[in-house]
Image (tube, rainbow, N blue to C red):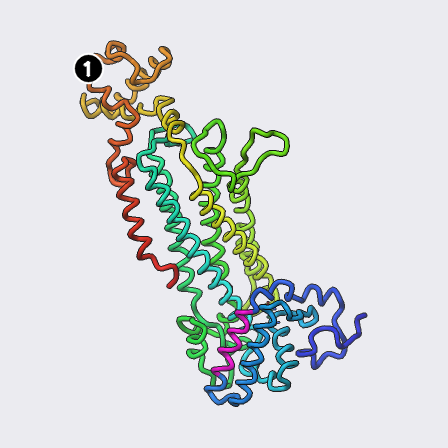
Amino acid sequence: MHNDASKGSGLIRGRFGEGMSEVMEQINASIGFDRRMAMQDIDGSVAHVTMLCEQDIISQADATAIKDGLEVIRGEITSGTFTFSVELEDIHMNIESRLRDLIGPAAGRLHTARSRNDQVATSFRLWVRDANDRALALVHQLIEVLVEQAAQNTATIMPGYTHLQSAQPVSFGHHLMAYVEMFGRDHGRLLDARARMNESPLGAAALAGTSFAIDRDRTAELLGYARPMRNSLDAVSDRDFALEYLSAASLCMTHLSRLADEIVLWMSPQFSFIELSDAWTTGSSIMPQKRNPDAAELVRGKVGRVHGSLFGLLTVMKALPLTFSKDMQEDKERTFDGADTFELCLKAMIGMVGDMKARATEMRAAAGAAHATATDLADWLTRELGMPFREAHHITGRLVRLADEHGCSLDELSLEDMRQVDARITEDVFAVLGVEDSVTSRRSLGGTSPERVAEQVEEWRARLQQAPTTD
Ligand code: ARG
């Protein structure tokens, strides 16, 4: 079993007399997952061979045969007729071996002035750039649905919370716009990451560059990269692009989990702040009354997978000496799973936010409970009676206690009751005790008054018109 020299890739085992052990083959092979980069690998090879021909490193006839063969392989992989072989280790050698079946010895010229080290760095970087672009488009879409849901709810009043205790009434639109700000920053982080990852490692060869007169600017241009990477050692050993993508995805997942958690709370009968249609909920197998927000719970739960991908890859890269080590083959599964999970969660959240309906009556009732306008009362005492805020805070506390004793809300106290606590209070105080008054009065920049929220909505609508999804 150990001495079959045909085991392991015949393409590169010229000096080996014996084959690989089965476990060696199993631990070594990446074809089970890196086949996902097949299209990017073919793109990289087409660019490389185009440049080799332009530089007179290979002949026009060989270049044409190689490119035609690669396009045949692209078709076979796309249509599902390509046979992947574990013995050929990875996607790069699977494709090269098939190319040799198709066009004969000319296939061997494709790998001139190239190594699998710069090849895999190029293919994987292209794959991550595609994933980053898909994420940019999805985050953009999520911001759009949030802004439109906020536009419907600028004047819908809900309790604002600190410590999950009812704090001050706010606009539901304002609450949603807070998430728009978070996802706006996530979009910016993905754009930043894209600019940094958009450099070409191709031509770094194994690690030191090559003695062939290659044109790295040309392959960079053909692959849509802004420029070649400047240092060949860095080019083959850098995985920052995947780490940055996963970092941006991880932080965005944290934001998604916060919104997901609020959706779970708002959907509970105790809150009853929103409705989600059947499209985004499941029933219970035993309790027929239930409508479970499973999609929101799963978004909340899946954050762990994306964070795990980031930490997994950070740990793979930690303390790795320059340049390439096979450890780095562990970059792909982490990143693929992180990207799949991230994109699925973004799609689920886009669906839920678009679907959700605010239950304005229930929100308004909760906003009016628990003396949510106590701060407005303290502000009134400070502004109208000239009290230091600390004294106003104290008097308001006594009024809250009085209202509790009477089993009523602050605006249901009589003026006489209030004057027993402080004789300077006048009838005018009632104008600030209503929930609507409270929200409308918070007109400071970034505040919750419906007019301010409507302004934020308009600003974001304008930004969304201009925002590039890539660049
Ligand atoms: N399958 C490898 C990877 O994913 C390709 C690079 C192999 N390079 C090497 N020197 N063995 O990283």
Spot occupied by residue 317 in the image (x, y as percentages of width and height): 55, 61
Spot occupied by residue 15 in the image (x, y as percentages of width and height): 70, 81
User: Where does label 1 land, which residue?
Assistant: 424
Please say if 385 is above or below 301. Answer: above
Dot 1: within a 10 Å radius of its alpha carbon, few (fewer than 14), some, or many (20 or more) residues? few
Q: Main secondary structure of the magenta part?
A: helix
Q: Is residue 393 left or right of residue 284?
A: left
User: Residue at coordinates 80% horizontally, 74% vertically from top-left?
Assistant: 3
Q: What kind of residue is marked 1?
A: Arg
Q: Quadrant of the N terminus?
A: bottom right
Report the number of discs.
1
Spot occupied by residue 30 in the image (x, y as percentages of width and height): 64, 65
Check the image and name the residue furthest to the right: 1
- When asked about the image quadrant of residue 17, the answer is bottom right
Please say if 192 is above or below 345. Answer: below
Q: Is mark 1 within 8 Å of ligand 1?
A: no
Q: Quadrant of the C terminus?
A: bottom left
Please say if 178 is above or below 48. Answer: above
Q: Secondary structure at mark 1?
A: loop
- When asked about the image quadrant of residue 220, the answer is bottom left
Relative to the observer, which residue lies in front, 25 or 269? Answer: 269
**50 is within the stretch colored magenta:** yes
Relative to the observer, which residue lies in front, 15 or 302? Answer: 302
**159 is within the stretch colored magenta:** no
The magenta span reads 39-51
